[in-house]
Image (cartoon, rainbow, N blue to C red):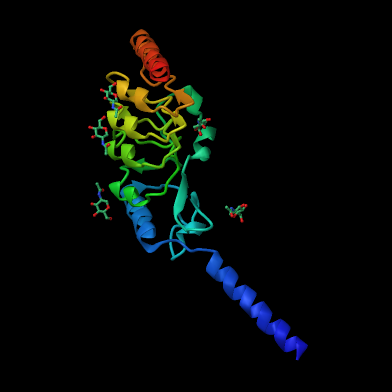
């Protein structure tokens, strides 16, 4: 009799732990698959990206209690072995290339995006990145993004860390970045080629704006 009870009790525990460990949401899984379809992944780092439970995929972290994707950790550490320091242009057998599909916006609970050390040299930073309302960490360093930094990044009001270093931007640092009042870390080092002085001035203006925001 006792054994039967213990058995039933164990079943109950196993069942409830299944319910507690939330699986990936289908619409988020589809968003990730669209992202995967838009990039080229020469060394097949995303080979685990199949099946139903996207929370078990490489580089994807879900919130335990809700099952929503919160981290996208696709910084390509393999490229740091590919003499990144020698040149800004990363041409490596490991880098993701291609375009970042807007489908990613389906991941509404993202707090952390790391796409560093990949090769997005054919594209600018997508404006839609400014729409991730919950984002706290954005690392696009060493990713060869070109063109202008979109002013939309200034909409990321919860951002603490913004690393855009080692890119190839043109134009000016958007003053809208000064709207991110939570920012405690900003790196634009080696992002603008030789156009340094201009950007030092922009940065000082940016800092002043921050101070003004605190003062008023
Ligand atoms: C994004 O992904 C969707 C679905 O896979 C596709 O229809 C669309 O063309 C993609 N957009 C871009 C810009 O690649
Ligand atoms: C989520 O799961 C991980 C690994 O099992 C654990 O370390 C972490 O504390 C959990 N977080 C919460 C909020 O339960
Ligand atoms: C961003 O990524 C690069 C390369 O992976 C890393 O060296 C750097 O420390 C990261 N920045 C932050 C703020 O974590
Ligand atoms: C984001 O920022 C841009 C430019 O700074 C602005 O025009 C746009 O309305 C903002 N979008 C949202 C959703 O706040
Ligand atoms: C963001 O910054 C721009 C330029 O510095 C400013 O004109 C705009 O009003 C700011 N937007 C918000 C919502 O603070």
Residue 174 shows up from this direction = no
Q: Is residue 59 above or below residue 148?
A: below
The residue at the point 29 percent across, 40 percent down is 128
Residue 188 shows up from this direction = yes
Residue farthest front in this picture: 216
Residue farthest bottom in this picture: 1
Residue farthest right in this picture: 2
The residue closer to the viewer here, 210 or 29, is: 210
Q: Quadrant of ligand 4?
A: top left
Is residue 12 toward the left or the right of residue 74 in the image?
right
**Residue 32: x %, y % from top left:** 38, 54
The residue closer to the viewer here, 6 or 80, is: 6
Q: Is residue 9 above or below residue 172?
A: below
**Residue 173: x %, y % from top left:** 32, 20
**Residue 36: x %, y % from top left:** 36, 52
Q: Residue 5: name its quadrant.
A: bottom right
Image quadrant for the N terminus?
bottom right
Q: Residue 68: name its quadrant.
A: bottom left
The residue closer to the viewer here, 93 or 127, is: 127
Q: Is residue 184 above or below residue 14?
A: above
The residue at the point 47 percent across, 31 percent down is 161
Q: How many discs appear? A: 0
Q: Is residue 158 above or below residue 40?
A: above
**Residue 23: x %, y % from top left:** 48, 63
Image quadrant for the C terminus?
top left
């Amino acid at each position: 009799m006792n054994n039967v009870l213990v058995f039933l009790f164990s079943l109950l525990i196993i069942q409830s732990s299944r319910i507690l460990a939330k699986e990936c949401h289908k619409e988020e899984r589809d968003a990730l698959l669209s992202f995967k379809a838009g990039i080229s992944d020469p060394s097949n780092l995303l080979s685990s990206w199949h099946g139903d439970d996207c929370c078990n995929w490489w580089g994807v972290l879900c919130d335990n209690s809700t099952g929503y994707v919160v981290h996208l950790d696709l910084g390509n550490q393999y490229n740091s072995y590919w003499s990144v320091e020698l040149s800004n242009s990363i041409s490596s057998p490991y880098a993701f290339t291609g375009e970042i599909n807007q489908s990613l916006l389906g991941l509404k609970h993202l707090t952390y995006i790391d796409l560093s050390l990949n090769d997005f040299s054919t594209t600018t930073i997508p404006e839609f990145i400014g729409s991730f309302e919950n984002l706290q960490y954005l690392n696009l360093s060493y990713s060869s993004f070109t063109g202008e930094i979109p002013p939309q990044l200034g909409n990321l009001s919860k951002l603490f860390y913004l690393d855009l270093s080692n890119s190839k931007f043109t134009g000016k640092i958007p003053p809208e970045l000064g709207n991110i009042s939570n920012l405690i870390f900003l790196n634009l080092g080696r992002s603008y080629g030789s156009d340094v002085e201009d950007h030092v001035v922009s940065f000082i203006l940016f800092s002043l704006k921050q101070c003004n925001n605190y003062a008023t």
